[in-house]
Amino acid sequence: MDMDKLVSLCKRRGFIFPSSEIYGGINGFWDYGPLGVELKRNIKDAWWRDTITSRDDVVGIDCSIIMHPKVWEASGHIGGFSDPMADCRECKGRFRADQLTYIRFDLAKDDSAETKPKTIYFFGSGNAVEVAEQNAKKIGKLQSSIKPGETLNRTDGDYTTLDTEAKTLFHCPTCGKAGTLTEPRNFNLMFESHAGAIADEANKVYLRPETAQGIFANFKNVVDTSRTKIPFGIAQVGKSFRNEINPRNFIFRSREFEQMELEFFCHPDQAAEWYAYWRKARFQWYIDHGIRSDKLRLRDHDPDELAFYSTATADIEYAFPFGISELEGIAHRGDYDLGQHQQFSGKDLSYFDEERWERDKPAMGMTSFKEYLKKNEGAEKPGYPYQYLPHVIEPSAGADRATLAFLCEAYQEDEVGGELRTVLKFHPRLAPIKAAVFPLVKKDGMPEKAEAIYRELKRHFNVFFDEKGAIGRRYRRQDEAGTPFGITVDGQSLTDDTVTFRDRDSCKQWRVPAAGAVQALRDLLEGKPIPGAESPATEIEESSN
């Protein structure tokens, strides 16, 4: 699929617009148009219903975008939420140093074996790496320890002070100039602001870079007010903000985005089991909603990729036109987050399993939990297994990334009636418009009958009425919008009070009683077979002319 075609379609049909476009736009921000906002809302609603309202063990929450700054100290975002960036002095390009290909050279200052080699780095991509290797071998001072294809985690020294001969090894991936890249510097990704009348350090706050920390900070509130019991989850959908240095790939990486996150709290002994459950369930969710191709994959992180607190992490990835990238991560986070907030806040965030305690205490001959704690005084976890910090399984999905993946998967070009058409084959549950109602022609009472059906459908579904242009052109417009079903009032409708249903994907047509149009559409959206759908219908010419 051509990404440029999809971006053009999204703009032309009102899915997604560049933000502030009349002023030239602003990089990393996007506006969702009439169709786009419906698509994204349907994705979020489907996630919410499947993750929260259809289950007995998950509740929802909606946390503030701006929180106390110590939340971000506890989570590590203030101290460590940064990307190493290298700038090109020539073309002014900026690159994430940990994503650039590099080669490390150990450059000795002289021939003495006791002289500590100076480590320098070559940044580049593709064939530039091979060129660097060849150049390196020509410089006698370079040692033989050339390591291509590694990931840059740190730098040693300032390579800008090297002699001219060594500087020729450094090339900008964009302009190709040598010796123009700066040494990597860390850029904090959080947006800063100030709460109150005075903009000083004491009033500094941050726009949240993720929704998860609001859940952790409210863990005790939820336990105390909702009578939830381990295992259970807290979920929310909301905006997050990251000052991405290089937003790119349409809505995939932007500075303002929406997350769909679940923090599932469980007993440490059951965490591995729940991780396996959510890893499988979240992957299946995308398949159930239309991503059935081989472009979807589930990739487990290698041990060296895991965060220090994580036991296991898997990414649900999709093969976008610009490459395979993450849609959602499922992480076993242990008790790290609750532990951090307990430490920084000074509040007890442990969970007490009262049912288990009441069940076991008679066999132990104890009357109070204080007695149990006293007996285990000096143990690393004196209250375990009745009082403990729960472990957390975190499925974290991006609503915007999911929207882009469903757009990419739905986009197809095929031929109908000898004509090429562009069609978005969304799962009916996600489609922005569920059905479009058409009068075949604007006469003989067809518009009035069609509008009456439209009004009745509008009470239940998001539907569209279109009476302008040839019927084939109207079908094509709705195909581009991803509308799964068309309902046409034609000449036969005036005699037997039936209408023609049309399927977007197969273009198959069948007749349904007009009075049963609402139920027929409901059944179709739920995937149920329609009685009589196999019977032939009066074929309506789909030519756009």
Image: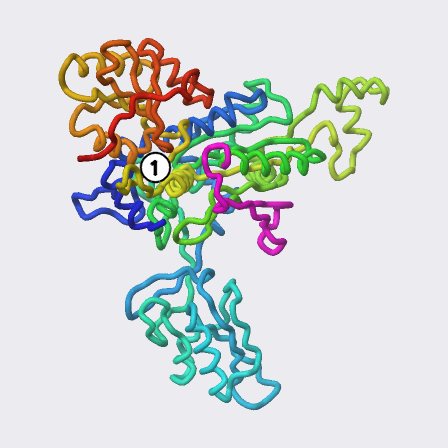
Give the x, y percent position of residue 314: 57, 45
Q: Is residue 135 above or below residue 292?
A: below
Q: Is residue 249 left or right of residue 384?
A: left
Which three-letter amino acid code belongs to the residue tagged 1?
Leu
Asked whether, in this view, residue 65 is left or right of residue 376, the answer is left
- Residue 509 percent location from the top left of the image: 34, 25
Q: Is residue 207 visible?
A: no
Residue in the image at 56% along x and 22% along y? 55
Instruction: Say if 80 sits above or below 348 in the image.
Output: below
User: Image quarter for residue 448?
Assistant: top left
In terms of depth relative to the viewer, which is nearer, 13 or 315? Answer: 13
- Outermost residue on the left side: it is 443
Q: Is residue 335 visible?
A: yes
Q: Quadrant of residue 114?
A: bottom right
- Please state, as top left, top right, bottom left or bottom right, where the C terminus lies in the image: top left
Q: How is the image coloured?
A: rainbow
Task: State whether residue 334 is above or below residue 63.
Answer: below
Residue occupied by mark 1: 424
The residue drawn where x is 38% and y is 69% is: 182
Q: How many marks?
A: 1
Where is residue 355 drawn, in percent x and y?
Answer: 72, 19
Q: Closest to the observer: 109 or 272?
A: 272
Q: Residue at image x 57%, y 26%? A: 220
Per the image, label 1 sits on a secondary structure element best described as: strand
- Quadrant in which residue 39 is drawn: top left
How crowded pointer 1 is (Cα within 10 Å; few <14, some 14-19, many 20+) is rated as many
Residue at the bottom extreme, as displayed? 111
Residue 366: within the magenta? no
Magenta range is 287-315
x then y, percent, for residue 335: 63, 38
Residue 303 colored in magenta in the image: yes
